[in-house]
Image (cartoon, helix red, strand yellow):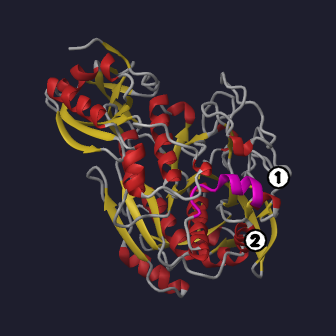
Amino acid sequence: MSFCIPLPGSQRLQPPEAVYLGVPAEDDPVQVTVVLNRKSEAPHPAASSQPLSRAEFAELHGADPTAVAAVEAFAMEHHLSVAKSDHVARTVALCGTVAQVSAAFGVDVQVHQLGAVTCRLRQGPIHIPESLSGSVLAVLGIDNRPTAHTYHSIRPRSAGPTSFSPPQLAKIYNFPPNTGKNQTIAIIELGGGYRNGDLQNYWRKLGLPNVSVVGIAVDRARNAPTGDANGPDGEVVLDIQVAGGVAPGARVAVYFAPNTDEGFLNAINAAIHDKTRKPSVISISWGAAETQWTPQAMNAFNAAFHDAALLGISVCVASGDNGSSDGVDDGKAHVDFPASSPWVLACGGTTLLASNGKIQSETVWNDGTNTVGTGGGVSSFFSRPTYQANCDIPAPQGSKNTTGRGVPDVCAVADAATGYNVLVDGTEMVVGGTSAVAPLWAGLIALLNEQLGKNLGWFHPALYGTIAQHKALNDITSGTNGAFSAGKIWDACTGLGSPNGAAILAALKSTPAK
């Protein structure tokens, strides 16, 4: 057996609030996902005139077959079974017992209580053979603590004077009048579920035909409504009803996965590489502060989002609902991941007042305490991308980087006091949060794709270039999320602004074809 070394970025710490319960039974089953590097360096998608076909992507940027074979040989040596090898997504799923997995990767696994969840935790790094050090990007799943949170807040219909249906917001934000026909919007969910009866009643109330919605199981998770509208059901239904409400001609595919770093990544890969439904845009309303992630996990997710960009798939992600601290109690500013990935469209939140389909005022969403409001700030992990070169972005806090990726890119209404009308578990309610902004933008992108006759894909250079120059976004200049204040053009509260859908379309059509 070759000499084993720590896998860079795999160091784990046990949360201080974790309550030790003991050690797992040695024969408890465990599945892990080994994420591999590309066999060739991926280009910047802006350098290519067209997205790669799936066949081209697999040939150029899938896993090296020799690396897959080496991982499979490692598994055999340690009595692990290979559940699945996906050369395109560059993942190998391995199964074994706790004892086998612990021995194979040189980790100590314990059982802890985290809030209401009992889970496996590990401390320290994962170890891999030195012979695999250039091939393995991450090993996920040994530690199965919940990895992400939903970003939505609920109020009763009677608790405030203002709320909007998705079609009303489409009018207010001047979305194109088409329906998103022949588009598929993928939604990633890490718990909860939806009831078809609720969806049908909701579409009927809006005067829309039934939107096509299908649930896809990932890693044995499935559409499983809990009956608690205040729980994850609220997130799932919000995402579906917002995306489907603004793009009712699109298909909505909901990928359900366990709330672990392994499950989250596998759901994203399932959507990106789905040859049946072929999503053109993905909406993600789950995340956590960058400090809650291991570097190996962020690198693995970021590589998957780069895959999406190469394939012409847009990814919209909520920027968080805890202001500039992102819920971290250390007095510093933090941003949420995966919103901080440079390959995703990070979506911040506003408070919106409108009348007769027109915006009266739009400001940064902040409940006044700086702890409930739009996430935004500067990444401590990802450097400033070239598309933000001309933005006035502060230096990140607690980072060796001198520059960081600014979050968010765009925004829309997220304040529950001026929120979204939804129907969850038979109950009408108003929901807010940046988790509503991601599916709203995903629905808009589906409309734009239909109008353009091609996938918008990763459009950040156009967003910060042509679209911003044409003033096709509503610039938000009032308000603060704590550490940061709104200002002209880009800011760390609302990005470049909220959408003017028709103006965005016009700006994109004015850009000469490559």
State the SS at label 1: loop
Is 366 part of what is drawn in magenta?
no
Percent x, y of residue 231 = 45, 56
Mark 1 or mark 2, earlier in chain: 1
Percent x, y of residue 163 = 66, 72
Frontmost residue, 306 versus 487: 306
Q: Is residue 413 above or below residue 263?
A: below
Q: CA distance from mark 1 to mark 2?
A: 16 Å
Q: Name the residue that disc number 2 marks.
A: 503
**Which residue type does callout 2 highlight?**
Ala
Q: Give the quadrant of residue 413.
A: bottom right
Q: Name the residue that disc number 1 marks.
A: 489
**Which residue type does callout 1 highlight?**
Ile
Q: Give the overall secondary structure of the magenta segment.
A: helix
Left or right, residue 146 beside residue 506: left
Q: Is residue 167 above or below residue 148?
A: below
Q: Quadrant of the N terminus?
A: top left
Give the magenta-colored segment's residue range.
456-466
